[in-house]
Amino acid sequence: MIRLAKPWIGEDERRAVAAVLESGQLVQGELVERFELAVAALVGRRHAIAVSSGTAALQLALKVLQVAPGDEVLCPALSWPSPAHVVRMAGAKVQFVDVDADEWNSHEEAFRGARGANTKAAIVIDQFGNPARAAEIRDALGALPIIEDAACALGSRFAGGPCGSLGKVSCLSFHPRKILTTGEGGMCLTDDDDLADKMRMLRNHGQLGGEFVVAAGNFRMTEIAAALGLAQLQRLDEILARRRELAALYRDSLGELVGLQSTPPGAESNYQTFGVVLPQGRDRDAVREKLRERGIEAGLLSFAIHRLGSFTGSDASMPIAEHLAARGLAIPLYPQMRNGEAEEVAAALSGVLNG
């Protein structure tokens, strides 16, 4: 079976984890701090706050921006549900924003049109590592706080700088399907000293200077996770280059057969996920099963969040998100993948679609 994704774990990671286990310092120590400093430098942010997951990062971002019941938060309708779920968990209303049919991100016009009197913040997603139109969205939203969901976008670049550099707070994920993995884990990035101090306090039971000053949970990252992340950072350039090589192979092989994601002018994707949109009339689940019969694992591309059970009763109409969720497939792509395997995937998909 050619798997959809595989984390790249080698001897460097194994040695790094073994060293942590031998040290006895397993949580929130020197390695977490080193990992934070390295990622902050990579993205060009003043502060990085490591946490237990990408979802935890989003939760802290909403908390320090004081999103509360009665507020609305703009959120793209096509995504893994975490961004919308954390808004609901904060007691606020999700104001869904449809996405562009080519780039699969929400554009500035859609954000501008969805903004209302109670809008407190906007979540901007770099879908599958494809950079959003950062400058245009920033101009369209003015002073409205932006949370960049860059969960998939480490190593991607906007036309004007690295993904993770947009807005008041940017959020990363280090889930096993992401560019770098720490098992589970996430990170908040900001240039605001006050917000950074608050997020550090909130991730650690509300402690400040040894005192518990607010009621808060535990969102800390382990030293084991940070050791994995630091080891993987050493070959980030190799990971990115290989993903882009494989994506180019797929684009050359499949571009006339399926719909592919477009990248904004001047931007560069890391191809965290390589998605295809099937032609009209093709049954997505049937194609997926036929690929599995040929030894190839394909996944659902994404979700139209407003149509999920967790948003039962939503009357939002997001036709492009719904189309992409219904017809989209994610196909295998990971840096250890051989060219021959990618060619096998492309040939199998072509064969299925051509009958």
Image: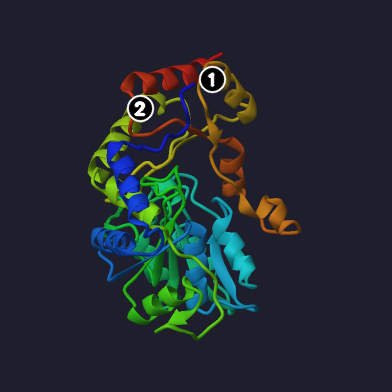
Q: In the image, which disc is placed on residue 127?
A: none
Amino acid type shown at disc 1: Leu
Q: Which residue is mark 1?
A: 353
Closer to the camera: disc 1 or disc 2? 2
Mark 1 is surrounded, within 10 Å at the Cα level, by few (under 14), some (14 to 19) or many (20 or more) other residues, namely some
Q: Residue at x 39, y 53 (%)?
A: 225
Q: Residue furthest right?
A: 313
Judge by depth and name the residue closer to the eye, 70 or 262: 70
Q: Residue at x 47, y 32 (%)?
A: 4
Amino acid type shown at disc 2: Met
Q: In the rendered image of this protein, does residue 332 appear above or below residue 198?
A: above
Res 119 quadrant in image:
bottom right
Q: Secondary structure at mark 1?
A: helix
Q: In the rendered image of this protein, does residue 295 appear above or below residue 246?
A: above
Q: In the image, which disc is placed on residue 337?
A: 2
User: How was this image coloured?
Assistant: rainbow
Judge by depth and name the residue closer to the eye, 149 or 5: 5
Work out whether residue 96 can be spotted. no
Work out whether residue 304 can be spotted. yes
Give percent across and percent down for residue 233.
27, 49
Looking at the image, residue 144 sits to the left or right of residue 243; the answer is right
Mark 2 is surrounded, within 10 Å at the Cα level, by few (under 14), some (14 to 19) or many (20 or more) other residues, namely some
Res 132 quadrant in image:
bottom left
Looking at the image, residue 78 sits to the left or right of residue 103; the answer is right
